[in-house]
Amino acid sequence: MKTLLAALALTVLSLVGARLAFPARRSSVGVRLFLSSGSHFVVFGFLLGPRISGLLTDEVLAGLAAFVALGLGWIGLLFGLQFDRGALKTFRRGELGLVVGEAAMALVVLAGAGALALAASGLWSARAAPFVLAAAAAGCVSSPTGAAVVFGSARVRGPVARLSSLCASLDGAVGLVALAIVFAVFHPVQAPGIVDIGLLRWILTPILLALIFGWLFYSLTRDRIAPQEFVLFLLGLALVLGGSNLVLGTSALFAAGLTGVLIANVSPIRRRTFAALVAWEKPVHVLFLLLAGSLLSLSSWLIGPVLVAFLALRIGGKLLGGLPARRLIPPNPAVSRFGLALISQGGLSVAIAVSALLTLGTTIPDARLAALMFDVVVLGVMANELIGPPLLKRVLAAGGELAAPG
């Protein structure tokens, strides 16, 4: 009964929060900057969780796994739908290469420096590797939310703005692929008697699930579906897709993202699908942030120094990864600092952290490392959502692409 009441309460909070707690365009830039990040929902979720009020106990949170599966499936589908080959053809290969390159560089910097730091402090072990890699996968991802705040407060036009918007929208693909590989490499050993083809099996499993669900979507939507029924269909698709991967220990985000890619390039109703997912994005986003906040532990003093290192390394990785932009943008004072335009993070990074906590946390016997990874990533997202937009404005201003101050 307590789980049912919690589910109903979270559903109401998500619907009300999505309607009231996001900023309107007429709001000040400061208000939009604070509210667009959704950090207040993470804080509220932490207050509801087992560490503060206890309204959402560990047992209740375990019973709300379906909501987590729904969120992972929905976020993955929405992200994957952006990879429409028709839209991607409008960008040069070098620009798409930069999207992959800057995120990959941030991933390497975060993973490499994290491993070296743990080794130097004597804390490195085989159990630490997956959590370091998962944190790097979440950290390499940018978010277009900060750009939306900046672009909504000023007339912005130019190659730096265009390229930064492209990278922030699509570089999450690197994080999703990296997470899927981490889950495959560190997947638990199967029980005796079960055929296991090792790493290849756990890489192919989410791909196969994506193909199956993509085919189901295409087959079941060839006939016209009423708007209300279509939303329910998408909710069911996201829930089952996310839940099946959580049960198998594979990446729900990767499978859902790949399903979204298939829909974007095969289905004749891809635009309708994208519009429906966007229309219900805020309630699902609020629900997911509330649950993410309730999973925070904040129980170790190591969070402070590790968080500072995480933020610094991520900025360094993005700066290094953004250097190839010099070949794509005409001589511009902002090009050398292009990586600073990609500091904002958002819901996809939080989703990667939640997925890693629930999957790796159950397969790797080190709850302390799992909690530390999750806390640092979520707090890092909250910090980067606040510092990212001002840094983006400075880069655009240096390049002369900020036409009116916000």
Image (cartoon, rainbow, N blue to C red):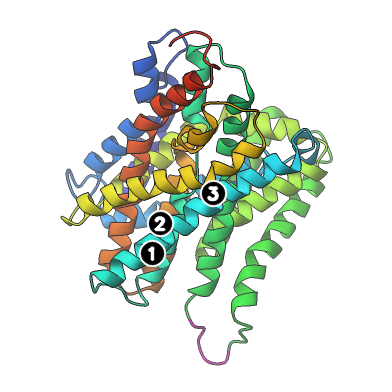
Tell me the CA gap for discs 1 and 2. Answer: 6 Å
Label 1–label 2 contact, CB within 8 A: yes
Q: Quadrant of residue 374?
A: bottom left
Q: Which residue is mark 3?
A: 103
Label 1 crowd bin: few (<14), some (14–19), many (20+), radius 10 Å: many
Asked if 156 appears above or below 59 in the picture, the reply is above
Residue 226 visible in rendering: yes
Residue 100 in the image: state x and y as whole percent: 62, 49
Label 3 crowd bin: few (<14), some (14–19), many (20+), radius 10 Å: many
Most common secondary structure along the magenta stretch = loop
Residue 54 in the image: state x and y as whole percent: 19, 47
Asked if 58 appears above or below 268 in the picture, the reply is below
Pair 1/3: label in front: 3
* 264 left or right of 388 in image: right
Q: Which residue is mark 2?
A: 135
Tell me the CA gap for discs 2 and 3. Answer: 13 Å
Give the numbered dot on residue 131.
1
* Residue lying at 44% horizontally and 21% vertically, measured from the top left: 19
Q: Quadrant of residue 6?
A: top left
Residue 89 in the image: state x and y as whole percent: 79, 37
Q: Amino acid at mark 1?
A: Phe
* Residue lying at 36% horizontally and 67% vertically, measured from the top left: 115
Q: Which residues are magenta?
A: 189-193
User: Is 156 in the magenta?
Assistant: no
Tell me the CA gap for discs 1 and 3. Answer: 18 Å
Asked if 113 appears above or below 224 in the picture, the reply is below
Label 2 crowd bin: few (<14), some (14–19), many (20+), radius 10 Å: many
